[in-house]
Image: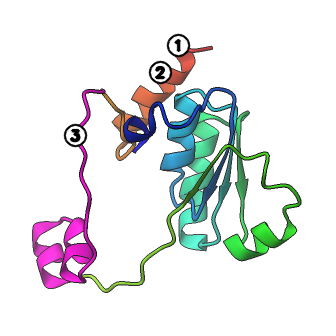
Amino acid sequence: MFNTLTGLIELTGADVLDLYAGTGAVGLEALSRGAGTATLVESDPAVLSVLRSNVSAIAPDRAHVVARSVPAYLAQRPVLDLIRFAFLDPPYALPESALERSERLEQLRFLENGIGIHVRETPYDTVGVDTEEDLRRVEEILGSRS
């Protein structure tokens, strides 16, 4: 996603808002690409401990977790115009399908429910955070930038 946005938005020093943050992948990736701060808003108790752990491990001084619903957070936040980049990815309440379960591909859930997936190939090398090893690699990258 960020490779697609390169040239369209300037992240350097930006305040980033990641709504429905989940594990924090988007906000933390923005920080790894030069954003100044990230506010990660999540209300799901099942995900909050993972989110807090990821923030603590990767960017405790530049990322802030808000444990509230997105509507409640937005209602109390006075100035949204200072945010340069906001990412909203509300959770889909779609049931897991048998094919998804057997193939172990969560993308099938969307396709089987008529939701298209757009794929873009870029020449850039990116880092996803899906495993402990990925997390260590991102920590190394962030550490080398300080």
Q: Quadrant of residue 57?
A: top right
Query: Is residue 9 positioned above or below 52 on the image?
Result: above
Q: Nearer the viewer, mark 1 or mark 3?
A: 3
Disc 1 secondary structure class: helix
| Residue 109 at x, y percent in the picture | 24, 76
| Residue identifier under label 1 | 144
> Is residue 87 toward the left or the right of residue 5 in the image?
right
Q: Nearer the viewer, residue 53 or 83?
A: 83
Residue at image mark 3: 121
At label 3, the amino acid type is: Glu
Amino acid tagged 1: Ser
The residues tagged by marks 3 and 2 sit, at their Cα atoms, a distance apart of 23 Å
Is residue 17 visible from the viewing direction of this image? yes
Measured Cα–Cα span from mark 1 to mark 2? 5 Å
Segment tinted magenta in the rendering: 97-124
In this rendering, which labeled residue sits more in front, label 3 or label 2? 3
- The residue under label 2 is 141
- Crowd rating for badge 2 (residues with CA inside 10 Å; few <14, some 14–19, many 20+): some
For the residue labelled by badge 2, is the local secondary structure a helix, a strand or a loop? helix
| Residue at the extreme front | 8
Q: Is residue 69 visible?
A: no
Asked if residue 98 lies in the magenta stretch, the reply is yes
Q: Amino acid at mark 2?
A: Ile
Q: CA distance from mark 1 to mark 3?
A: 27 Å
Tell me the crowding category of disc 1: few under 14, some 14 to 19, or many 20 or more residues within 10 angstroms, Cα based: few
| Residue 142, x across and y down, in percent | 54, 23
Q: Residue at x 55, y 41 (%)?
A: 28
Marks 1 and 3: CB-CB under 8 Å?
no
For the residues bearing labels 3 and 2, Cβ distance under 8 angstroms? no
Q: Quadrant of residue 137?
A: top left
What residue appears at the point 58 percent right and 48 percent down from the top-left corner? 53
